Amino acid sequence: MCVYNRDKALCHRLEGRQEAPSSDRCQASCANISRTDHHADQLIALAETLENQAGSELVPVPLADRFRRRANRLRTLADEHHRTRITAVLEDLS
């Protein structure tokens, strides 16, 4: 999810200033990215899918290696989300 702030947007760093994000140029390290726990869960599910595909005997070794690298990157992003997420703390009013 993008909380677009054009001053921080990496999707337009090589171009002029845009008024909207370019999702096709989204960078994982952009300060505008906002993830929910659901997004992190989806990253983990995709990583598992890629790892399963990489384990197939039908997938060429170079492609399997690429799938594993991508899966590791997705897991890193999900882990970073869980480590740095901001959560609401409910006060006990009793």
Image (cartoon, helix red, strand yellow):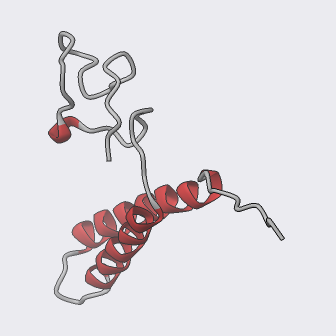
Seen in the picture, residue 36 relative to 32 is either above or below; the reply is below
Left or right of residue 89, residue 43 in this image:
left
Locate residue 19, reporting x and y percent: 18, 19
Residue at the (84%, 71%) spot, across then down:
94
Left or right of residue 11, residue 72 in this image:
right
Closest to the observer: 32 or 88?
Answer: 88
Residue at the (49%, 61%) spot, across then down:
78
Residue at the (80%, 65%) spot, across then down:
93
Residue at the (38%, 62%) spot, across then down:
39
Left or right of residue 65, residue 60 in this image:
left
Locate residue 57, reporting x and y percent: 23, 89
Q: In which quarter of the image is residue 53?
A: bottom left
User: How many labels sit on residues?
Assistant: 0
Kindly give the residue lying farthest to the right in the view shown.
94
Seen in the picture, residue 34 relative to 14 is either above or below; the reply is below
Locate residue 38, reporting x and y percent: 41, 67
Locate residue 25, reporting x and y percent: 20, 36
Seen in the picture, residue 66 relative to 6 is either above or below; the reply is below
Closest to the observer: 25 or 33?
Answer: 33
